[in-house]
Image (spheres, helix red, strand yellow):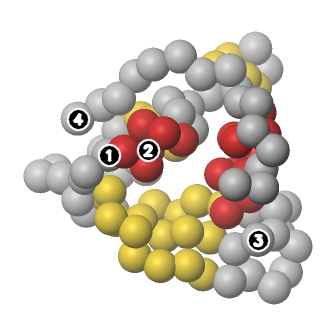
Amino acid sequence: MEFRCSNDETTNGVTMPFKRCSLCDAVWETRDEFLGDPDLQLNGYQFTSRNLTQYRGGGLLLYTHRNRSCGTTLALSVRKFKENVIQHGGTGEE
């Protein structure tokens, strides 16, 4: 299943989704779409003590994309969730 809706996050003038599955190319345009998808299962948290530019510190949340054609593990920076909240009018402290 592929998810599509509008999002305010852009890179080089191109609207970027919140997350894209690296195996099946499913797209979640927003954090709320991602969190509301019943095909995603939170498996854990991976701490990172280094300030890796790719993950911007804060560690990773690990999800399994459980649908008929997939099964891959998705890693999302904890910081990405916080930035998404701030970008859409929240404080990031929720």
Residue type at tag 3: Gly
Element marked by disc 4: loop
**Residue on which the image places disc 1:** 37
For the residues labelled 2 and 1, say whether their Cβ atoms are less than 8 Å apart: yes
Please report the residue visible at 81 percent of the width from the left and 44 percent of the height from the top.
91
Element marked by disc 1: loop
Marks 4 and 3, the one that precedes in the sequence: 4
Q: Along the horizontal axis of the image, is 65 left or right of 87?
A: left
The numbered dot on residue 81 is none
**Residue on which the image places disc 2:** 34
The quarter in which the N terminus is drawn is top left
| CA gap, disc 4 and disc 1 | 10 Å
Q: Residue 15, percent across and down?
A: 64, 20
The numbered dot on residue 1 is 4
- Can residue 33 be seen? yes
Marks 3 and 1, the one that precedes in the sequence: 1
- Could you say which is closer to the camera, residue 32 or residue 10? 32
| CA gap, disc 3 and disc 1 | 23 Å
Q: Along the horizontal axis of the image, is 56 left or right of 19?
A: right
Q: Residue 75, percent across and down?
A: 53, 64
Please report the residue visible at 67 percent of the width from the left and 63 percent of the height from the top.
78
Q: Quadrant of residue 14?
A: top right
Residue type at tag 2: Phe
| CA gap, disc 3 and disc 2 | 19 Å
Residue type at tag 4: Met
Please report the residue visible at 69 percent of the width from the left and 74 percent of the height from the top.
59
